[in-house]
Amino acid sequence: MNKLRTFGLCVLLLLTPALLWAQDVIFKTDGGRLRGKIVGETTREVKIKTLGGVFRIPRDEIDRIERDGDVFKTFARRRKALRSSDSKGWYALGVWAQDQGLTPQAVDCFHQAVAAENDHPEARWELGYRRLDGRWVTEAAYFKERGYRQWEDRWVSAEDYARWEQGLVKLDNGSWVSQAEADAREESARRKPAPRRGLKRAPRRSPKGKAPAKARRKRSPWVGRNRPLGAQVGLPRLTKEERKAQLEQGKQRGAWKVAVASDYYDFFSNGKVQDVNKLAKTLDLMCEEFKRIFKFKAEITRPFPIHLYGSKQEFMSRTGKGQGVGGFYDGRKIVAFHGATGSLSTQSTLFHEGTHQFQGLVLGRNMWRAKIWLIEGLAVFFEACQPAGKRMKTNIIPKGRLAHVRRAIRAGNFVRLHDLIRMEQRQFGALHYAHAWSLIHFLVHGAKGGKKRFLEYWERTKQGGHDPVKSFEELFNKPIDEIEAAWKSYVLKLKG
């Protein structure tokens, strides 16, 4: 489900190989890609059939082609063939994984490249490090030492920070306007006829700053810029007629087959109505569980939209996401697809992204300031939940995550807790998801007084204005090494 690209909130889920849709992928020289089945080739062009139709791509516009296959198996095979000291190989595999939409795996590869070559500039850049006075520091440290301040998911000058605080909005042309004027301009642009879509080349966007020559373009945060958070509270409740009209409007606008209103969500789907009704009922239970656990007292007066495509193929075609993305939350909606099975089913995906949606609802702009271990750890914690009557069972252990972190602990290459709780989003890979989940599970279920202290940590995060690392150390009031030892022991003894 990138901290907060799309607000990309992405937020990124790892799907099992059984969920993959076999396909060919054409990577174009302009950075675009087409997924489907290659149905014809000549020395001049390649013809590919996609869900959007059949396209002919000139050879000189093609960078490379990935043939029909399982990208997860390909990734595993290439990873197994690499030596631990092969920094170039790890970096190349990370770049390839990024192209396939396997972002967490790509991050792990960049970590491996840095482990093999500490001064690897391209891998360091991808992980968010910057050069400062001859040393590598995190992006946050880099900007802080240069007088920048963090506004939501970005670093801005002190002057721009003051403007944001005043409620102004910066337009693409660099001018500042009120939020009302920005909304009016956006509404006006939305009403204009959409441009015809073709296969014209789009200009590449270069990363800001002085990136190494071979570094890739900077990925977006997992939650997109300028997205309104918390828009479900503080607004008048809709009447039944208004709610019905809003639902129908959304259905027509998106050409959805099914539209279902639940207590807290508006579901728009191309799947079966009975499946949507079941998911709607379960997501309402999950929302009630969020409210209970985090003592959320505000009245939720507006529904939140959920888009469910009919299949993995349709999801990828309509959203442009890669095979490694099972769903995402972008601040305005949750997007997933029907038909996912296994440990990360459609329900689990909605629980994961629904956690991010609830975090956005409760934390507002402080969501951007929260540490990524907390944001993603909670999402993994709740993704395994199952309905139990009128409540949700929240202590279910995701076996794959547990196995992942156990292997790391036993092999001695686990992530130290003092590194995990300080980690920036762009450094957060697949292994860190498992670590973050296991730390939260330990604090809530395995540490005496841990749940109370963890909820206090959440409250401090909600209020903002605190150092998240310092708060963690203060609240748990023990040396971090002592907490780490107890956490490792707890994880190794867990049954799952």
Image (tube, rainbow, N blue to C red):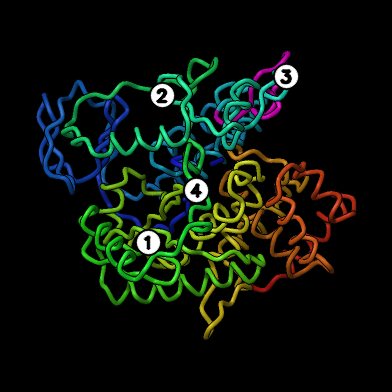
- Closer to viewer: mark 4 or mark 2: 2
Q: Out of 136 and 280, give the one closest to the viewer.
A: 280
Query: Which amino acid, by three-letter code, is at mark 2?
Result: Asp
Question: Residue under circle 1?
Answer: 18
Give the residue number, with chain letter if any, for mark 4.
11
**Residue 374: image location, x then y, percent:** 66, 52
Q: Indicate yes or no whether the magenta region holds residue 138.
A: yes
Hey, what amino acid is under mark 3? Arg
Residue 298 falls in image quadrant: bottom right
Q: How far apart are the alpha carbons under marks 4 and 2?
A: 25 Å
Distance, label 1 to label 2, CA atoms, is 42 Å
Residue under pointer 2: 172
Please name whichever residue, 372 or 102, is drawn nearer the observer in this view of the structure: 372
Q: Is residue 406 magenta?
A: no
**Crowding at mark 2 (Cα within 10 Å: few <14, some 14-19, many 20+):** few
Label 4 vs 3, first from the N-terminus: 4
Task: Identify the residue at image location x=43%, y=56%.
Answer: 15
Question: Which mark is drawn over residue 135?
Answer: 3
Which type of secondary structure does the marked residue at label 1 adopt?
helix
What is the span of residues highlighted in magenta in the rendered image? 126-142
Q: Earlier in the sequence, mark 1 or mark 4?
A: 4
| Kind of residue at disc 1 | Ala
The answer to which of marks 4 and 2 sits earlier in the sequence is 4
The spot of residue 322 in percent (x, y) is 36, 45
